[in-house]
Image: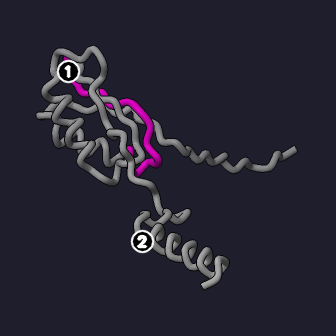
Amino acid sequence: MSRMNYAVALLASTTAALSLALPPALSSEEKAPSIDPVASVSTGQTEGADIANAIVQALNADKSLADSKITVRQEKDFVLLTGVSPSQQELQRATEIASQSANGAPVVNTIQPRKITYKQPEQEPNKT
């Protein structure tokens, strides 16, 4: 076998071995898994931390919220959610999950969707 054929065979076998060893690249439609938690308890939270921690665990367990970033704070009479979600649907889902885990406390959601669509009202033509 000539040196050139040997080099080509070595390169081909190395490429084949690497393609089997490496995970496939994500297509543009697939999302990389989120490694950051979705939710966290507000820093300095002391009172009501048990409820806030339960809500955080429930939010982090829901995979549909993977691209959201939510902070949970237990206030005296309510639970406050702040942060950002990809859409209105994830925002509503976060409220549902928090309400189920809030032990009866009202949930106030100030999470903002990343994308907001505004529609301008149609104006009537001027009658002059």
Q: Residue at x 63, y 48 (%)?
A: 119
Q: Is residue 77 magenta?
A: yes
Mark 2 and mark 1: Cα distance apart in space: 56 Å
Mark 2 belongs to which amino acid? Leu
> Is residue 90 shown above or below 7?
above
> Is residue 113 shown above or below 105?
below
Residue 112: x, y in percent?
46, 37
Residue at the disc numbered 2: 20
Which dot, 2 or 1, sits closer to the camera?
A: 2
- Is 89 on the left-hand or right-hand side of 122? left
Residue 104 falls in image quadrant = top left
Q: Toward the viewer: 16 or 122?
A: 16
The image's mark for residue 77 is 1
Mark 1 belongs to which amino acid? Asp
Position of the N terminus by quadrant: bottom right
Q: Residues within 10 Å of mark 2 (few under 14, many from 20)?
A: few
Label 2, secondary structure: give it.
Answer: helix
The image's mark for residue 59 is none
- Is 94 on the left-hand or right-hand side of 54? right
Q: Residue at x 20, y 39 (%)?
A: 57
> Is residue 49 shown above or below 31?
above
Q: Which residues are magenta?
A: 76-91
Q: How many marks?
A: 2
Q: Residue at x 38, y 44 (%)?
A: 91
